[in-house]
Image (cartoon, grey):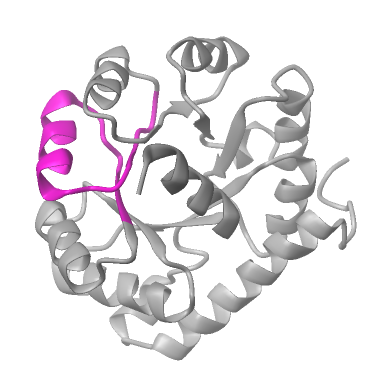
Amino acid sequence: MTKKEMLAGIEEIGIIPAVRVGSPEEAIFASESIFGAGIRVVEITMTTPHAADVISCLLRKHPNSVVGAGTVLDMATAEISLDAGASFLTSTGLDPDITEFAQRYEIPLLPGVLTPTEIMAAKRAHARFVKVFPCASMGGPAYIRALRGPFPDVGFVASGGVTQQTATQYIRAGANILGIGKELLPPDAIRARNTDWIHELARRFISMVQKGRNGNGNDDAVS
């Protein structure tokens, strides 16, 4: 799968589940629950214990899935993620060294941005998608809508505070993809190994993405 094809596949799904848990066993359970719900992409945050081993394990067991590394904050973590076979990288901010690293090794990078200045810098670095984080703190869907006008050719991943109440509105406001953590993978569901709970939440978020793309839903969250 090429870099372009991988990014297109993630955009088609419209959701990047962020797995941030306290053990490798929890990370594998959470990821496989997501796969079982029909979402074939996950992001293993590198703050998860033995995250690189989790990424490698998931890719061996589920070769048709896309397993990325999240919270890549420095070059050492980027190199570990690449060695583990990560399908893509995401970072909390925009780091020129990590950007250059991703370009050199042809691995998709979704850099974290917050301001128009950072988005412009990411564009100069040829980023196809940027992760707007923390999105909810900056005004939520209304902030995405404000950014969409001057940046029509940038793919936005809305991340940080996306909920069931706002998911559809983020898509309608111009987000291409939603980065979702605990709202999709509740800690209690993971501790209880409650697959049904996670599957139901996944079903809801998938439906919300489709409603947003089809123009359904109300505009209450975007004022």
Q: Is residue 53 above or below residue 23?
A: above
Q: Quadrant of the C terminus?
A: top right
Q: Position of residue 140 (x, y in %)?
A: 69, 40
Residue 211 quadrant? bottom right
Q: Is residue 216 left or right of residue 118?
A: right
Q: Is residue 117 above or below residue 209?
A: above
Q: Can see residue 23?
A: no
Q: Position of residue 23 (x, y in %)?
A: 16, 66
Q: In this view of the protein, which residue sits in the foreground, 119 or 11?
A: 11
Residue 3 quadrant? top left
Q: In this view of the protein, which residue sits in the foreground, 152 or 6?
A: 6
Q: Is residue 184 left or right of residue 115?
A: left
Q: Residue at x 37, y 79 (%)?
A: 33
Q: Residue at x 69, y 60 (%)?
A: 209
**Chain part drawn in magenta:** 67-93
Residue 129 among those drawn in magenta: no
- Total number of numbered discs in the rendering: 0
Q: Can see residue 186?
A: yes
Q: Residue at x 64, y 44 (%)?
A: 176
Q: Position of residue 77 (x, y in %)?
A: 15, 35
Residue 195 quadrant? bottom left
Q: Is residue 72 above or below residue 44?
A: above
Q: Is residue 44 left or right of residue 128?
A: left
Q: Residue at x 31, y 86 (%)?
A: 193
Q: Position of residue 131 (x, y in %)?
A: 50, 35
Q: In this view of the protein, which residue sits in the foreground, 191 or 54?
A: 54
